[in-house]
Each structure stands twice: as structure tokens, then as C-alpha cells.
Amino acid sequence: MNVLVKPSLNVFDLYTTMFSNRVLLIYQGLFDQQMIKTVLSMTEMKLVKENVNENVKKKVFNIMMEGLQNICKHQFLKEETSHNPMLLISRDDNHHHIFTGNTIHNSKIELVSSKIEQVNGLDKDGLKELYKKARLNSVISEVGGAGLGFIDMARKSENPLEYRFFPINENYSFFILQVKISNQ
């Protein structure tokens, strides 16, 4: 009889947590074109299996792509940390949740926070106007196209963006972004 070695993280507890939180997909590691194709394909299979309506499916894919673009842009900024990016998609009775996580330099936290807070402070019409303005005046920076991704995610999800920074060391933090998409 083989005896399982007890890992430091109880795998069954992790499985139970993922099952009870209806995790559809989770990936942690570097993202390249092949991995993005695989993640999109797996997500599509899960959404089809769960009979998710086309409008919600489209929103999930659009927001996923925005998050993956952010991850791909920043995943190699980790000279001093080994924290790989992650993507998690889960579902509850009312929403699909898309979580992205990636390393961010601490000097960028205030800028990213202010862009998200600006987006979260606007209604539908305000987001539409900010999106137009940002597209017209867009200056591509190290953070991206004037926060267009955040604006687009908030517009498509019709929900505030939730986020948090977890310190890694004196130079870097891990940035978690959660976007909720209503299941209607």
C-alpha cells in the first residue's frame, strides 16, 4: 500500500475550497501566446458546459483579455522577485469573478490606485466620456494607455473594480485585481 506524503498545503483542502467557491479556472505562471490560447480555450469549454449566456460569455472574454494584456505587459518586471502572474475565474449565483495578479513596482502603486479610484467614481455616462477622452488624449506610458484597460473593464462589467496590493519586498508588491460580471 502506498501512503501519500502529507504536503505542506493540504491538497484536498485546496480542492474543497476551489470546489465550494466554484473555481472554473486557475493558472499561475508565465503567460505566453500558447498559454493564453490554452487558457481561453479552457475557459470557453467551462462556460459552454455551464450554459453561460452569450452576452456574459462575451464580457468574460473581453475582461479576461484586458487582464491578460496587463499581465503580459508587466510579467517580466520581476528582477527582484520570483512571484509569477496568475489568473483565476470563479462563479457564484450572481456573478462571474475574474482575478488577475501580477508583480508591480511599488513606485507605481499610487498611480494605479488613482486610475482605478477615478474609474470607480464614475457612472456609466462618466465612464463613456472618460473612455472617449482617454482614447483621444492617450499617451502610452509604462502603466498603459492612460488607464484604458481599467476603464474598459469597468464599462463592460458594469461593476466597480476591486483591488489590493500585497507587499513582496521593499521594491515590489503583488497587485490583485478583481472584476465582477453579473450573470444576467
Image (spheres, rainbow, N blue to C red):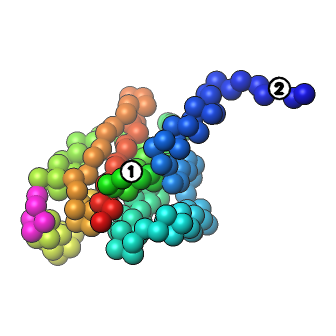
- Amino acid type at circle 1 is Asp
Type of secondary structure dominating the magenta stretch: helix
In x, y percent, where is residue 118?
14, 53
Q: Is residue 3 left or right of residue 131?
A: right
Between marks 2 and 1 in the image, the one whose residue lies nearer the viewer: 1
Query: Is 123 within the magenta?
Result: yes
Instruction: Name the one closer to the observer, 9 or 51.
Output: 51
Toward which corner of the image does residue 130 lie, by quadrant? bottom left
Q: Secondary structure at mark 2?
A: loop
Residue 111 visible in the shown view = no
- Quadrant placement of the C terminus: bottom left
Residue 2 visible in the shown view = yes
In x, y percent, where is residue 4?
78, 28
Residue at 51% from the left image edge and 54% from the top image edge: 24
Q: Which residue is mark 1?
A: 92
Whether pointer 2 and pointer 1 mark residues with C-beta atoms closer than 8 Å, the reply is no
Q: Secondary structure at mark 1?
A: loop
In x, y percent, where is residue 92?
38, 50
Residue at 44% from the left image edge and 51% from the top image edge: 90
71 relative to 138, above or below: above
In x, y percent, where is residue 162?
27, 46
> Of the numbered discs in the image, which one, if any, rests on residue 138?
none
Q: Is residue 29 left or right of residue 115?
A: right
In 3D space, how far apart are the residues under numbered discs 2 and 1 (Cα atoms)?
A: 36 Å
Instruction: Name the one closer to the observer, 11 or 99.
Output: 11
Question: Which of disc 1 and disc 2 is earlier in sequence?
Answer: 2
> Of the numbered discs in the image, which one, if any, rests on residue 3?
2
Q: Which residues are magenta?
A: 122-126
Query: Is 146 within the magenta?
Result: no
